[in-house]
Structure formats: C-alpha cells, structure tokens
Image: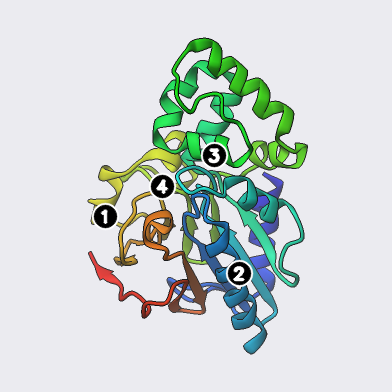
Amino acid sequence: MVGGFLNRMKAALGGAPKEGGVPEGMRIYAVGDIHGRDDLLAELLAQVEADAAASPVSSNILIYLGDYVDRGLQSKQVLDRLTGARPAGFEHVFLKGNHEQALLQFLADPAFGKTWKYYGGLETLHSYGVKELTRTDDPAAFVQAREHLIEVMPESHRHFLETLEISREFGGYFFAHAGVRPGIALHRQIEEDLLWIRDEFVDSGASFGKVVVHGHTPNEEVVVRPNRIGIDTGAYMTGVLTALVLEGKEQRFIQTGEMPLRKAAAG
C-alpha cells in the first residue's frame, strides 16, 4: 500500500507520463529471467551502468522480473550479487518469479523437492553445495537436503526471497514475472497468475490497460506486441540475457553475448 502511494507520488513529481511511456526524467531498465547465470548478470549490469552514465537522467530504475534461480549453475552467486553491493545511482526493484516461489516451497516442505529438482532445483542446490538429491528420490534425502540448505543459505538470501514484490507499475507499463490474466483489472490480478500464467496471456491480443513487461515464457528473440513486451531470452540456454530500456516513449534493448542484438519478434 505504502509502496504504491510512493510510486504514484514519484510519477507525479517526475511529470505526467506520455501515453504508453514513462514519466519525464525517468529511465527504466527491466532485466529478464537470469536463471542462475551470474556471469551474464555481471556482464549485463556493467552495460546498464555504462548506458546510464552516458546519458544521465533524474531517476534510474533497475527492475528485475524474477527467476533468479534454477536451471543455470550459479544461483547462489546470483543471489550473492543481488543481496550484496548493488549498482549505485539506481532504485532497485525485485519481483518474484515462479522459481523463487518453488525454492521457498521446498524450504517449507521438503517433499516438494521431488518436483522441484526436475525443473531446475537440483542446479540451485548444487550451487549451495547441497548434493543429497543428486542420485536419489528417497524421502529422507529430501529432508536432509532441506536441512543442509537451511544451514548453508545466508540469511540475506532467505530475507531477499521472502520480501520480493509481485508486480510494479511505472507510467504506462505494468511489470510482472509471467503476465496477467486477460479481462481482470491490473489491480485485481492474483499472485498465482502474475507468477505462472502463460498461454492465456501470451496468446491474447486484448488491451491490459498498460503495456505488460514480463519474462517467464522464453524466446530466442524479444517479443514486442502492442499489449506486452516479453524479455525472457532463455539466458541459461542461449547465453543471452536481456534488459529492456524505457525512456519517454522509447523502447530499446541491451543484451549480453557476442552475437548481434536480437531483433524484436513481432507478435
């Protein structure tokens, strides 16, 4: 509630947003799904800092769309970076992804590990040095792995995971990990949809009231439609981690990797 009020005040102080844009004097960098690729995150953040320094504005917002963990081999290192010293001169916003929800569910219920380990959880456990589940699905091993993870996970990581936001709005944009349910007002969206929705959202041509910026559904190229912008470029597989840059009504992209910038995939 307080955060939403402050966001509205910042928008008012920054000037009225242009239609479909962000308030004057503000620049937003939205980072797609990282999935345990700390090497790519370090590279992308260096590019973001250089971009911001090259053309200073009153307010730089760095917003992460979730899925920091799983699949890649450096989940612990990603959380070390995000909970440690952060780029100066930015407001930082961290959204929750379905993979963070899965990690929290495992911490609450070790039996969930039987599901989680097969869609990226095993790599996360290994990044913390937790190896009990490598070759077994013995229920006792899940309990041991959970206890081991609780023992070795820094408190800063646990606090970070437990305090993630589920959505944010700036100007004409709405940010969420997975997307929104069509036909439901943005302020009435539920956490399950914001973290998990896919086909009903990505296949919809309906207006959502604002342009939804999201990850969750990977594509080799960014996807730009009138109602949404998808920036999950499958970093753990492709080596391409993407940041969307929003300033006024401008939309551009910063990406990692040696290949040329991916063109936007038309919807």
Front residue of 227/62: it is 62
Left or right of 94 on screen, residue 211: left
Asked if residue 249 can be seen in this view, the reply is yes
Q: CA distance from mark 3 to mark 2?
A: 22 Å
| Residue plotted at (67% across, 25% down) | 148
In-image side of 126 versus 199 (left or right): right
From the image, tell me which residue sits under label 3. 124
* Amino acid bearing label 4: Ala
Mark 2, other Cα within 10 Å: few <14 / some 14–19 / many ≥20? many
- The amino acid type of the residue labelled 1 equals Ala
Q: Earlier in the sequence, mark 3 or mark 2?
A: 2
Badge 1 is on which residue?
206
Q: Residues within 10 Å of mark 1 (few under 14, many from 20)?
A: few
Task: Of the two numbered discs 3 and 4 on the same chain, state the one appearing first in sequence.
Answer: 3
Front in this rendered view, residue 87 or 258: 258
For mark 4, what is the residue?
A: 178
Q: Which residue is mark 2?
A: 45
